[in-house]
Image (cartoon, coloured by chain):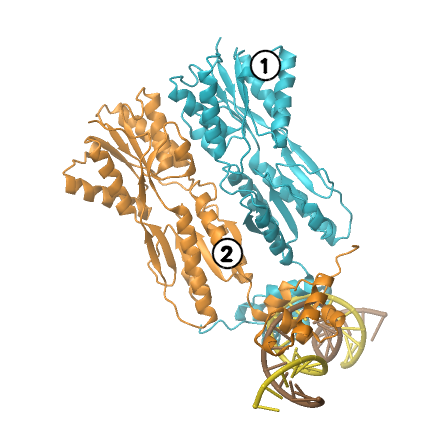
Chain colours: A cyan, B orange, C yellow, D brown
Amino acid sequence: MVKNKMVTIRDVAKESGFSSTTVSIVLNSAPLARYIPAPTKKRIERAAKKLGYRPNLFARSLRSQRSHTVGVMVADMTDPYCTLVLRGIENTLFQSSFLPILTDVHNERARFERYLEMLLDRRVEALIVLANWLFVDIDVLADLAKSSVPTVMIMRELQTDSVSSVIVDNELGAHAALEHLHSLGHRKIAFIRGPKTLADSAQRWRGIRSFAKESGIDLDSRLIVDLPESRDPISSFEAGYKLTEELVKQKRPFTALVAFDDQTAFGAIRALTKSGLRVPEHCSVVGFDDVAASALYTPSLTTIRQPMEVMGATAVGIVVDGINAVLEKREVSAIHRKMAPELVVRESTRSLL
Amino acid sequence: MVKNKMVTIRDVAKESGFSSTTVSIVLNSAPLARYIPAPTKKRIERAAKKLGYRPNLFARSLRSQRSHTVGVMVADMTDPYCTLVLRGIENTLFQSSFLPILTDVHNERARFERYLEMLLDRRVEALIVLANWLFVDIDVLADLAKSSVPTVMIMRELQTDSVSSVIVDNELGAHAALEHLHSLGHRKIAFIRGPKTLADSAQRWRGIRSFAKESGIDLDSRLIVDLPESRDPISSFEAGYKLTEELVKQKRPFTALVAFDDQTAFGAIRALTKSGLRVPEHCSVVGFDDVAASALYTPSLTTIRQPMEVMGATAVGIVVDGINAVLEKREVSAIHRKMAPELVVRESTRSLL
DNA sequence: TCCCGAAGTTCGATTTAAATG
DNA sequence: GCATTTAAATCGAACTTCGGG
């Protein structure tokens, strides 16, 4: 083989002795293929294989206006939360023969907009936004509503109903976390809440309060601290560390700690250990998310698992439906899915009883 | 705005009162644009903006045979090693206005081949293969050599010279790891080597032996164990755990342990802790890679850092050069880059002196 | 010759409308 | 009218060629 000489449909036509029209009909099993006799089909297929014909997707896309591509925008790749969600997205797209274009917004508005522009220019057929740590206010909808590209956000819900969403039931999860500690006999419990600007923070806190009310646990405001805002996902580790240090210094005793997320929990465990408090012997710790590292930590972390892979798959399901709707000119309104989290008990919590 | 009415170059031509040729020349600043008077340009640009003209990339690609897209194939996304490499790739591609199509091979040959086919069909202009945990024998070159798509592998070197590579200097890294322990006074050292089929394993071991020789350290074969082969990146944690458990049971004393990689080290630390051996008080542990979790671990892990983000960026640099070479019909041979790792000292190692 | 602009062709596949026996 | 096949138009941009001033 000398050079990259492209084999076109016309070459196949010439080789097989039929016109390019017929070749196209046969190779695509178009409706008209019904009328084409088997021998003709066979000859065309043989010719195509012999020449190693591969249709030019540029030409096909130009004609069909389809890219078979989905844009995936991640707020910040370095967040360990992304990994499994991406896996779920990738795997489900693969099954539908779509390919993902991955973009990492670095939590910067300008970058978000530039990427959005690039993706729309490429006519991605759908958009999946993984808003895992996004403080940037996004008015995707302004650009998106008119572009009729099915869009779904993971981890964040938009007030508009032009954008679908897949989120975890934060309230339920936090509720389960506290219930777990309560069932182990813990009563003096410290809390590291999320940054105020994150919707998750409020939702999880609501779950905490709801269980506290049910069970009569007393929430001591001096044991409740908030993570500062930050655009860097790793910062919650450091913040968790510092806040826990301060909680310990306060000398107000607690036997358990509920962290906003796993990274925060890691920071907390580090701080506790440094202060000579062993986890779980002296203090139990619960996280949220169940990132990969949680199972590997020493001690392994009890946490509330978000079904990340399933969430990714669900998001793809939603937009694929949306794509089909667009193709069939059906109207579809946004879908909002709230997934159930799951308590995963590991070594970082322990019974006082 | 009602519908998705595409604005074509002809619409701009009509609006501005010039032909589509002129519009094309102006909007692309083609060489001929030199001859076009400023007022004409201005009117065309104004018309384009007014109509919100965006060139159709399908048409452009069909004509130019360029996709401005790069295929990225990852052996297994769930490997924490991927994250930063991908970040480096993404960031550097962004600067060159390329977009990545991300595919996750799941360490399966069939999937690799299917994805490769899909990427080539889409005429990606280059291919980046992140072979982070790939046991599948890849004869990419068979398909690739003839397709003249610049290709680079990260973390693995191919014998052929049609495929470039970016790898870390494993020998140097392992050498530094042992040197570090030696300088802290450790002499009885256990080793968990990598799976035999991984080239890295042999290279790192060579580094160990070379320092042992230099310094006169005695390598006790009863303290040397090997990770089994596996296609699952997380398995090295479990294997690290089990092997360390056995090492401890053996009752053959050691004051430090060199793990094949960070995940293995995490497993080892878990096992040591479970046996009542504290890290680093009773045993120092060194990893390799410096994945994100290493800094967050308790204790934080001393390890050999691979410059992952830089490696991703370097890989992109290589293929972008390759792309330019292809465009200019220059010949370029494969480039093989070996990056220097860096010892990162944290809490998991401690001086005996 | 220099400057400006337009008509027409090309990229490769799909599809409509139509022709053949 | 039916089964079978195809010429020609189309998708949108870019480039080649040419003509007029």
Local crowd size for mark 2, using a 10 Å CA cut-off: few (<14), some (14–19), many (≥20)? few
Q: Amino acid at mark 2?
A: Gln
Residue occupied by mark 2: B95
Local crowd size for mark 1, using a 10 Å CA cut-off: few (<14), some (14–19), many (≥20)? some
- Label 2 sits on a secondary structure element that is helix
In the rendered image of this protein, does residue A69 appear above or below residue B259?
below
Q: Amino acid at mark 1?
A: Leu
- Same chain letter for marks 1 and 2: no
Q: CA distance from mark 1 to mark 2?
A: 50 Å
* Image mark 1: chain: A
Residue drawn 48% across and 35% down? Answer: A234
Q: Position of residue B221 (x, y in %)?
A: 20, 35
Specify whether B196 is left or right of A127: left
* Residue B112 at least partly seen: no
In the rendered image of this protein, does residue B321 appear above or below residue A95?
below
Dot label at residue A219: 1
Q: Position of residue A26 (x, y in %)?
A: 66, 66
Total count of labels: 2
Residue drawn 64% across and 48% down? Answer: A127
